Amino acid sequence: MTGKTVDIDFGPERIPIDVPESAVIAEFQDPESLSSPARALADALVRPHGAPPLAELAKPGMKVAIGFDDPTRPPHPWHVILPEVVELLLAQGVSREDIVFICANGNHKKWSEAELRAFVGEEIFNGFWSTGQIVNHDCVEPPGLKHLGETPSGCVVEHNRRFVEADLMIYVGQVMAHTWGGYTGTGAVIGMASTRSILSHHNHGVVNHPRTAMGDHRRMYFRGLKAEINAHIEQSTGKRIFYINWVGGSGGRMTGIFAGYSPEVEPPAWEAADRYSVIEVPQADVLVIGLCERFAYGNADNPLIAAIGVAYPPRVWLGDHVLRPGGVVIGMTPSTGEIDTETYPSYQEVIDLYADHHEIHELARHQDAIATRPEYLERYTKGGAYHPIHPFWLLYACDYVLSRAGAVIMAGTRNPGAFRKLGMHPARAFDAAWKRAETIVGPNPVTVVAPTYWSRRIFKFAVKCPEPA
């Protein structure tokens, strides 16, 4: 091959690979950060979108619940935002004892004391942890959940009781490109939901709907369901959720802070994110993705986490699918295929179940049995383990690329069998993966390489449609 060398993520390091000279290298470029995040936050709270200023909403005697994205995100923005929100609430006469912080972990694990301390920062942790005012959301505990009915589309609305019963609901989150929604945001809808609620919109039919496996947040089916649930919560409670959303670059670098009600707060945040989260590429015959050591839900030694590392990016496209039908995805990973069963107790069983079925959607028949398994639930309830339903969502999200691609190849894995079980092809190294790809798509393939997709920042592939002949 006559080409060029690209350094690509490969677990904890970056290694060189040779790709065609014509290959398009797609990498996130950090925008300029805010010179004063505190000032930007103050401005956002004074002039929110679609809402009165937060200082006008907060009143003495109120019970205030502050939800926040869980520690799968970078912590720095919450260190900035949460103390300023508390200071404003106290200045308006809200009692410190009437404020509760709720980690919106959805079906993720309950985070430890040390993890929450690092995420919310010393000031908030020292002021509220010892009195039980920083808590993890529990997606299965009946007394802690409140059923609010169903949306017109049939989504179950069952959410954290302390949050929806508070006099003032505040949610602090991030807006970033992602397969779940095109852009993240309205985090209370997922992070504060029960398993039954999440099941109603994370099922295979929604996750693999043609208008969900795409990056267009304005047309996405799943995003529409989130908006529907948010509206139902507000209609049922008679209160609106005050969102504080930051947008930015890698490592928690903030370029904008937006506050207000949903949906009013979303378009300006989306517009800001669009300026640096959309990268133009051609439709690829071969899409190469570097996988760093940790991303999304944990360590990529876990084969299902490595799998979504190559399954998520092809779903986040604009204009046209980034991978042509029958194209090849190559993931670069030294994954050992080992699963930490203390943190992900149900993952291996669900992977093994998939091996006994022809289609991923057939796994749905096992959801209830796995989700209610006492030993799995005990590990979740006591903390430190993901809810047993979680691997279903990841496998469902893999179905799009497994169905569209001629092959998904995991190059460099140290456990070939772990990926064969997931319908993916192992290869010793990139060269072997490339040779296999050429036998599928032919010589001189249109190639797109995303070497730092997970280690820098997730972005959207804006696919240039070919000119008519």
Image: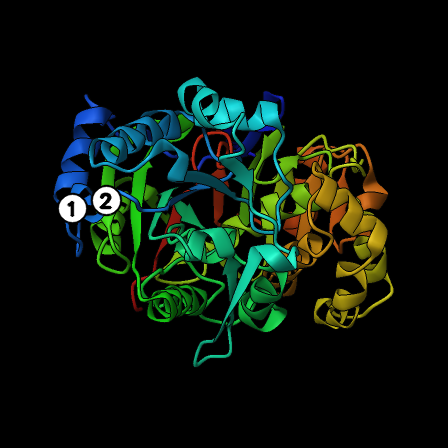
Identify the residue position indicated by label 2 in the image: 58
| Quarter where residue 112 is shown | top right
User: Which residue is drawn at the image coordinates 49% and 32% (left, top)?
Assistant: 452
Amino acid at pointer 2: Ala
Q: Position of residue 225 (x, y in %)?
A: 43, 69
In this view, which residue lies farthest toward the bottom? Answer: 152
- Residue appearing at x 44%, y 39% in the figure: 100
Mark 2 crowd level (few <14, some 14–19, many ≥20, 10 Å Cα): many
Residue 308 shows in this picture: yes
Q: Position of residue 22 (x, y in %)?
A: 43, 40
The image quadrant where one finds the N terminus is: top right
Judge left or right: residue 265 versus residue 7.
Answer: left
| Three-letter code, disc 1 | Glu
Q: Are marks 2 and 1 in contact (CB under 8 Å)?
A: yes
Query: Hey, which quadrant is residue 99 in on the image?
Result: top left
Could you tell me which secondary element the residue under label 1 belongs to? helix
Q: Secondary structure at mark 2?
A: loop
Front residue of 418 and 249: 249
Q: Which residue is mark 1?
A: 56
